[in-house]
Image (cartoon, grey):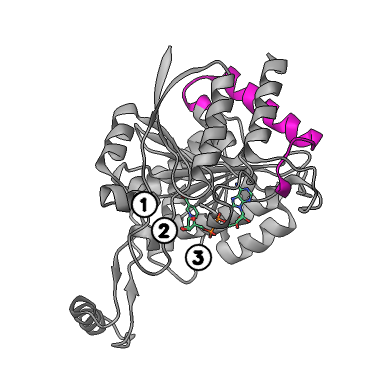
Amino acid sequence: MTYKVTLLPGDGIGPEVAFAMRKCVDATGVAIDWEEQPAGEHTIKTCGTPLPKEALESIRRNKVAIKGPIATPVGKGFRSVNVQIRQELDLFACVRPARYIEGTKSKEKDLDLVIFRENTEDLYAGIEFEKGSKETLSLIKEINSLQPRQIREDAAISIKPISAYASARIIRAAFEYVVKHKRKKVSLVHKANIMKFTDGLFLQTGREIAKEYEGRVEFEDVIVDNMSMQLVQRPSYYDVLVLPNLYGDIISDLCAGLAGGLGIAPGANIGDEIALFEPVHGSAPKYAGKNKVNPTAIILSAVMMLDYLGEQKAAEKLESAVRSIIKEGKDVTYDLKLDRADQTSVGTQEMADAICRRIKELS
Ligand code: NAD
């Protein structure tokens, strides 16, 4: 069987890590017809938009996609293409595993957790009001008339919607994952002591869903600031975390750091019918085109994709090859060497070629 998969190479280091990933997936023997679609900062010039409609249509049609990072200017310019794609396709669950890999600099040998980040709401919903605009001033007037705490007229405003519907489906996805993968516990992360209505609703929804899984899945809730400290001190205590969008974003980078850095952190954005796989890292523009960065994060994202496609054997083979190359520590990029200036480090494509050779040896 041949799978049709949309491939968005993206910006910066995206095309080179995407090319490396494609070689490794092809080496597993799974037949994939890659439908490559340009999207990102670079398509503004050629297509007049960072997200051409052909790219979205291709993902909708194929239902499975993998992408490299796409750049977003800070505080100005176009809205994040990554956020737009997740919202347009209703990819409500951002799933990010953080597992120890022998040979990395991580000291957390027992680290094995999976993050479920809500992907469509929260301060990421993109509902923002600029300082001084007509709409902002009218909104401020309305809010000030409804409650005693007064917002200053020179404020900008971001809206934080958290619904019972979106909370329930991400929390349920986390519980179902625990059951399916024979894990133990869901830890729900929030700040409901301060945001009683939004985070409070997320927590309340979690407590109700937890009752359905009583006796099968353990449940606890942890306040996000405490969770940040706990994760640094004893990450192996945690199993599956479920978080609203913003905390999920921050905590997943923290966990990527614990596991050994952005270069090895994979991810997936999953909806009811469509799944889009992508590394946690961004476009790292200063390394673009230098054949220098680590392709592991997107390759491990492809492992998640193969698993999603039902190709478990190929997924396991690819993951074993990656792990064994990193454990050996010879054909790896600079960030995986003990000393980043180590002259024996190899480039992105050379590391991918070593992984391809290892796949053949494991076959
Ligand atoms: P970044 O992840 O691009 O880079 C931060 C640093 O992490 C790099 O300088 C590098 O030292 C390291 N790094 C990242 N990927 C690596 C890899 N594969 N191998 C080795 N080291 C790696 O983060 P940033 O600089 O904050 O963001 C750059 C751009 O990427 C921004 O425009 C941002 O919006 C975008 N971004 C996109 C996504 C996405 O597409 N999902 C995610 C994050 C950031």
| Amino acid type of the residue tagged 3 in the rendering | Lys
Tag 3 residue:
191
Looking at the image, is 331 positioned above or below residue 48?
A: above
Tag 2 residue:
72
Q: Is label 3's Cβ within 8 Å of ligand 1?
A: no
| Amino acid type of the residue tagged 2 in the rendering | Thr
Q: CA distance from mark 3 to mark 1?
A: 28 Å
Q: Specify the segment rendered in magenta.
A: 306-335
Q: Please indicate whether residue 199 sits to the left or right of residue 289 in the image.
A: left
Task: Say which label, 3 or 2, has the lower sequence index.
Answer: 2
Q: Quadrant of ligand 1?
A: bottom right
Say which quarter of the image contains residue 16: top right
Q: Which residue is found at the position 71% from the left and 32% from the top?
A: 323
Q: Is residue 213 visible?
A: no
Give the x, y percent position of residue 106.
Answer: 75, 49
Badge 3: residue crowd in 10 Å (few <14, some 14–19, many ≥20): many
Q: Which residue is found at the position 59% from the left and 53% from the top?
A: 287
Q: CA distance from mark 3 to mark 2?
A: 28 Å
Q: Is label 1's Cβ within 8 Å of ligand 1?
A: yes
Mark nearest the camera among 3 and 2 is: 2
| SS at circle 3 | loop
> Mark 1 and 2 residues: CB-CB less than 8 Å, in contact?
yes
Tag 1 residue:
81
| Amino acid type of the residue tagged 1 in the rendering | Val
Image quadrant where one finds the C terminus: top right
Q: Is label 2's Cβ within 8 Å of ligand 1?
A: yes
Looking at the image, is 213 positioned above or below residue 138?
A: above
Q: Is residue 64 visible?
A: yes
Task: Say which label, 1 or 2, has the lower sequence index.
Answer: 2
| SS at circle 2 | loop
Does the magenta stretch mainly form a helix, a strand or a loop?
helix
